[in-house]
């Protein structure tokens, strides 16, 4: 027993003296819990989806459409865009703008709603809308679908009344419609009481009291937030299954059009694999950069630097090794995904390889920066694990960025995970050309240059070569 | 061959090298003897360019060594204190990589590798990973990895630490052969036996300074005595040793007393003391002093205790 106690004491003493182990056990988990809570807005009022760019084009000219747009604006999940994002002076978006903007690299929005000229039809009872999407991220797409339906159906009663009035007017004409409304109002108030003039005015304004249905249908409409079985392949947004909701389902026709990625054979895997790839790559190249410590501890740098070899030679060799390793790892992972999940890799192989080179370079520079600011392989491993998880979360490798608070979303585009995933998505999902992906490659190259410069500066000031 | 002038290196408040000046002649086997932390490895690292001095200069064959003097580095070979090899790679792969760093390629490189492995009896293990080698084999490979490019000056930074006697002897013989063939060697060690056996000239280094420099005979003349007297440290000799100490330096280590008489001390006085303590003559041995005695005399400390 004494032996066990002595050995136990030894372990605690060793642990207490190992700063890296102590921080990894206590400080890092605490920090991660706090940061992940911050990232996903835990216990905050603005938790849930936030600020998803959502374009709305109102081609109906119908005053009631403004109510629908206002309702969309009131939904915090959406950042409603009604003006063209890049014209000066600003002008309202038109239907013809939507597809080019959604297909462009770094598209300003991936979802759009068109309120067409025949929003309120006079050829039948009901509404007609058009929904355009680039469902690159399944979770985000499902969220948008659900929230969009909820918002639309909240505004339907008023629009529906207008539809009824318009349809009746088509068959009866203005004069006879007025007489019809007057007759109905008089008959109803004679039988049940009430003010016939007020009822006629409300009927003319298409207010048939459908608003009361909002209260009844709320529980059912919450189910609209549930994801459709396969949103990418749906031609209609799925409607609620309750009786009340079925009424709206019959009355509201939402035509959907997938603008980008419609021909992608394995959409779910294609949208996910980029996030997986970049995380594996980060772990691999960080471990590779940490090998600098092993070489230092073995005295190999002393031998190398006694030869006609400079520190720059050592660092460049390590960088190119990381890039080559990353490139091979990414290509293997994508080819494996092609085999396992049917992702179409071969048609995009040249451009995919190019993005892989840039992503590998960025990740390698990150690994070298970690090695340059730490003093031991243990510290490098702890710090890189922490940062990789942070960047993966903030960069959108786990969940859509739109699920994070707006403040956190500002940091997403500062992460190499975000831009690497953008690159993979641009090639595999959107099938973009070399010219189209150049901006993303430029950003990855810029991140590489900046981070690598910082790492080299730190290496030259540090003691790893001494 | 190598000229070192007023070389100084500080690490914060610690002065690792304090204005050292030194000339190494071509073909010399120079020993740098000092305890751990004396400044030996720092001096090596400055010569190889791993670190930059705070003051002073180093010139190799008249050319100042700076961080970018890659041409001069082609004349240098370093045997590091650690086994600076890639353990997962084979002996052949390790030597191939280190040879390529010096611009060696193809058949020339291969023939040099074969010769090097032959010289240290590792030819039959050339395709085995270094991690499977014994400590002595790794040390031998560590040595020849510094020689592939045929340097003019070889720096050996305590190359036999942790080596078994057989491998140590093999390393000594190989270095002596290289020196006979004209290679200039600077050999740092804290083993006086190594410096005594190998080096034609020795510099004693302590606390970043070189308090003594010369051949073994020249260093021994720094002592105020020519012989030292040894006797066992036992209860019977303790009172005798206490009295003897008043006449010179008395050091006790490994169960033995070593007495180095002060100048003018007469042998008759020694015999009178032995008779007074009834100690028989056969327990005393007389021998030539070693570098240990020189180090003790110059620094006031034993080499092994420093």
Image (cartoon, coloured by chain):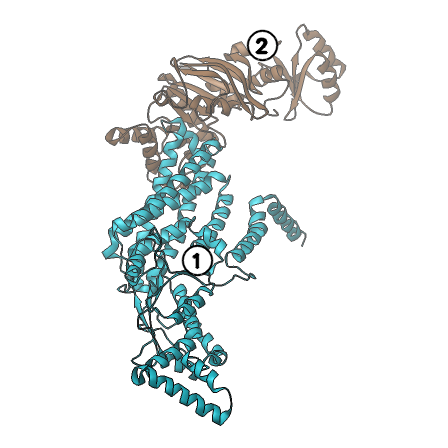
In this view of the protein, which residue sits in the foreground, A338 or A157? A157
Q: Colour of chain B?
A: brown
In the image, residue B84 lies at what x, y percent?
42, 33
Q: Which residue is mark 1?
A: A401
* The N terminus of chain A, quarter of image: bottom right
Name which residue lies at 51% across and 44% down.
A379
Instruction: Pinpoint residue B60: horizontal percent, then vertical percent.
Output: 40, 16
Above or below residue A394? Residue A450 is above
Residue A87 vertical position relative to residue A272 in the rendered view, above or below: above
Q: Mark 2 — on which chain does it sit?
A: B
Q: State the SS at label 1.
A: helix
Q: Chain of mark 1?
A: A
Q: Locate residue B236 relative to residue A144 in the image: left or right.
A: right
Query: Residue B112 location in percent, x, y?
Result: 29, 28
Placement of A224 over or under B199, stated as above or below: below
Q: Residue shown at 38%/72% (left/top)? A: A228
Up the image or down, A189 lies above or below A111; here it is below
Quarter occupied by residue A60: bottom left
Residue at 36% x, 45% y is: A443
Distance from disc 1 to disc 2, alpha carbons, whole Å, reads 79 Å
**In-front residue for pair A151/B231:** A151
Q: Quadrant for residue B146, please give it.
A: top left
Question: Which chain does cyan denote in the image?
Answer: A
Q: Is residue A336 left or right of residue A159?
A: left
Which residue is tagged 2?
A: B222
């Amino acid at each position: 027993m004494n032996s066990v106690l002595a050995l136990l004491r030894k372990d605690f003493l060793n642990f207490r003296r190992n700063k890296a182990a102590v921080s990894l056990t206590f400080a890092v988990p605490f920090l991660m819990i706090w940061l992940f809570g911050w990232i996903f807005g835990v216990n905050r009022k603005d938790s849930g989806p936030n600020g998803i760019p959502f374009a709305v084009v109102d081609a109906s000219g119908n005053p009631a459409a403004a109510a629908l747009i206002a309702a969309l604006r009131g939904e915090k999940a959406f950042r409603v865009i009604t003006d063209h994002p890049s014209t000066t002076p600003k002008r309202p978006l038109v239907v013809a703008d939507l597809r080019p903007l959604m297909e462009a690299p770094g598209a300003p929005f991936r979802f759009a709603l068109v309120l067409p000229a025949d929003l309120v039809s006079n050829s039948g009872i009901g509404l007609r809308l058009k929904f355009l999407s680039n469902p690159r991220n399944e979770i985000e797409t499902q969220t948008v679908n659900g929230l969009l339906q909820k918002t639309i159906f909240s505004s339907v009663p008023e629009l529906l009344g207008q539809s009824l009035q318009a349809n009746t007017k088509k068959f009866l004409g203005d004069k006879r419609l007025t007489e019809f409304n007057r007759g109905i109002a008089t008959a109803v108030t004679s039988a049940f009481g009430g003010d016939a003039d007020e009822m006629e005015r409300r009927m003319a304004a298409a207010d048939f009291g459908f608003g009361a249905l909002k209260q009844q249908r709320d529980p059912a409409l919450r189910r609209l937030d549930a994801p459709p079985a396969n949103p990418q392949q749906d031609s209609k947004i799925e409607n609620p299954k309750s009786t009340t909701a079925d009424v709206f389902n019959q009355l509201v026709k939402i035509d959907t059009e997938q603008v980008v990625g419609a021909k992608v054979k394995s959409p779910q895997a294609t949208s996910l694999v980029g996030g997986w790839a970049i995380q594996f790559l980060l772990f691999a190249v960080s471990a590779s950069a940490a090998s600098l410590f092993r070489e230092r501890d073995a005295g190999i740098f002393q031998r190398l630097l006694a030869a006609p070899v400079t520190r720059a030679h050592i660092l460049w060799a390590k960088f190119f090794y990381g890039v080559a390793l990353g490139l091979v790892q990414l290509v293997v992972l994508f080819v494996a995904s092609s085999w396992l999940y049917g992702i179409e890799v071969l048609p995009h192989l040249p451009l995919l390889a190019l993005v892989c080179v840039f992503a590998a370079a960025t990740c390698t520079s990150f690994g070298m920066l970690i090695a340059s600011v730490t003093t031991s392989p243990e510290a490098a491993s702890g710090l890189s694990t922490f940062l990789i998880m942070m960047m993966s979360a903030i960069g959108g490798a786990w969940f859509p960025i739109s699920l994070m608070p707006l403040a956190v979303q500002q940091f997403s585009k500062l992460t190499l995970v975000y831009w690497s995933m953008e690159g993979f998505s641009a090639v595999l999902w959107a099938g973009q050309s070399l010219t189209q992906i150049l901006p993303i490659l430029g950003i990855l190259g810029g991140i590489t240059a900046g981070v690598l410069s910082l790492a080299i500066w730190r290496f030259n000031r540090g003691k790893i070569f001494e | 061959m190598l000229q070192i002038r007023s070389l100084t290196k500080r690490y914060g408040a610690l002065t690792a090298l304090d204005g050292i000046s030194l000339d190494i002649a071509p073909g010399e086997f120079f020993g740098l003897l000092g305890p751990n932390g004396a400044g030996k490895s720092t001096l090596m690292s400055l010569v190889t360019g791993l670190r930059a001095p705070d003051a002073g200069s180093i010139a190799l064959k008249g050319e100042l060594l700076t961080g970018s003097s890659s041409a001069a580095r082609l004349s240098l070979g370093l045997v590091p204190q650690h086994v600076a090899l890639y353990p997962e790679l084979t002996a052949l792969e390790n030597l191939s990589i280190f040879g390529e760093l010096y611009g060696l390629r193809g058949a020339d490189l291969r023939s040099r590798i074969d010769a090097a492995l032959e010289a240290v009896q590792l030819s039959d293990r050339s395709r085995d990973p270094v991690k499977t080698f014994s400590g002595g084999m790794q040390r031998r490979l560590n040595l020849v990895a510094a020689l592939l490019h045929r340097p003019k000056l070889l720096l050996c930074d305590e190359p036999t630490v942790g080596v078994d006697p057989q491998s140590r002897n093999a390393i000594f013989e190989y270095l002596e052969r290289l020196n006979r063939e004209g290679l200039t060697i600077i050999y740092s060690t804290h083993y006086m036996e190594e410096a005594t056996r190998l080096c034609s000239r020795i510099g004693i280094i302590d606390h970043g300074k070189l308090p003594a420099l010369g051949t073994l005979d020249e260093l021994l003349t720094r002592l105020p005595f020519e012989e030292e007297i040894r006797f066992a440290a036992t209860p019977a000799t303790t009172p005798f040793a206490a009295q003897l100490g008043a006449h010179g330096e008395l050091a006790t280590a490994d169960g033995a007393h070593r007495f180095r008489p002060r100048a003018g001390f007469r042998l008759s006085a020694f015999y009178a003391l032995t008779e007074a303590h009834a100690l028989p003559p056969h327990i005393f041995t007389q021998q030539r002093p070693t570098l240990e005695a020189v180090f003790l005399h110059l620094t006031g400390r034993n080499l092994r205790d420093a």
